[in-house]
Image (spheres, rainbow, N blue to C red):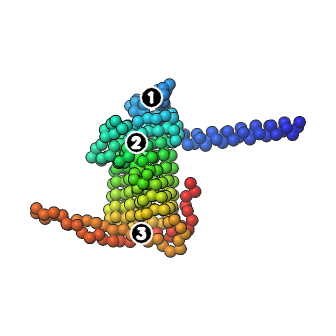
Amino acid sequence: MFSKKFLTIFISIFLLFSSIFIISVSSEQIAITSSGTTFYVDDSGGADFAKIQDAINASSDGDTVFVYNGTYYGNIVLNKSITLQGENNQNTIIKDNMTDSNSHESKFAKHPTILMINAENVKIANFKIASNISEISTYLFFAGCTNCEIINNYFVGCRLKIFEGSNNKIRNNLFKSDYTKGGVSLDSSDFNQITNNSFISLGGALSLLYCEGNTIEYNKIQDCLGGISLADPFDDFECNKIRYNDFLSIKIIKAVGLPSGSIWRHNYWGRPRVIPKLIIGGQRGYIPPGVGGPSLPVPPLLFFDFDWFPAKTPNCDF
């Protein structure tokens, strides 16, 4: 009798602490502090709004828009310094709108855009952002944004692009596609941090064009056709730091443009290495056209870089 009673009490205490642990982990995934008002969105009704855009329109800087599980459609414009937070990144889904996929095209975003952000201090967390369009990439597009955070999202066939943005953080996200789309693209964007992300089965994981001072570290890049592309990077004293990443089953590591002094250090290249990893790049250009004549291609100019201290074991444990 005593032993059975003791066992019952022990199991009850164990389940109580287990429940507390599970709740704390779940809360940690979605909890982002905000000092403003919280607006709730539920596509099935019963909340403040049924559409994300309506909640954004009603919000002010410093507010939070919390989105319950459901399927919501894109072509969303976020132009305020708010937190956009989903319930979880498996069941809180934002998809492109097939009937109006081109509504946010501009000179910056030539592809259909699920979510256009043009504000500072924006946080986006815990969404599954998925593309319905098979032929071309759709974008989560940041235009001129600074101090934004993109955390714990699941991108399916959707590319995250930052144009002329700085000091943004992209961390703990999963990017996955069918070898044709997805990944992260930085264009004329400096001092951003891309950390602890997984890039799986993409055409290209990361692309940097005219960028400097960015930190890319502790990312897993696996089974992709292309790893990291550096195109015409600046040759300034501030360089891009590419460190502690895992490159697993990658077809191409590409650096196109002038040597930039970017630092490649302690990356894992699919197997233990005892000698530095050679990285080959090149530059292609054209001779300007003469009067009435066409431009002429210039043979590619090759250059080399090294990961002088490649990792012997994977850096990422996720």
Seen from this angle, which residue lies furthest right?
A: 1
Q: Amino acid at mark 3?
A: Ile
Q: Earlier in the sequence, mark 3 or mark 2?
A: 2
In x, y percent, where is residue 5? 84, 36
**Image quadrant in which the C terminus is located:** bottom right
In the image, residue 187 above or below residue 1: below
Identify which residue, 234 or 132, lies in the foreground.
Answer: 132
In x, y percent, where is residue 49? 45, 28
Pointer 3: what residue?
279
In the image, residue 67 above or below residue 170: above
Q: Earlier in the sequence, mark 1 or mark 3?
A: 1
Within-10-Å neighbours for mark 1: few <14, some 14–19, many 20+: some
Q: Which mark is residue 50?
A: 1
In x, y percent, where is residue 43? 46, 30
Identify which residue, 98 or 43, lies in the foreground.
Answer: 98
What's the CA distance linking mark 1 and mark 3? 50 Å
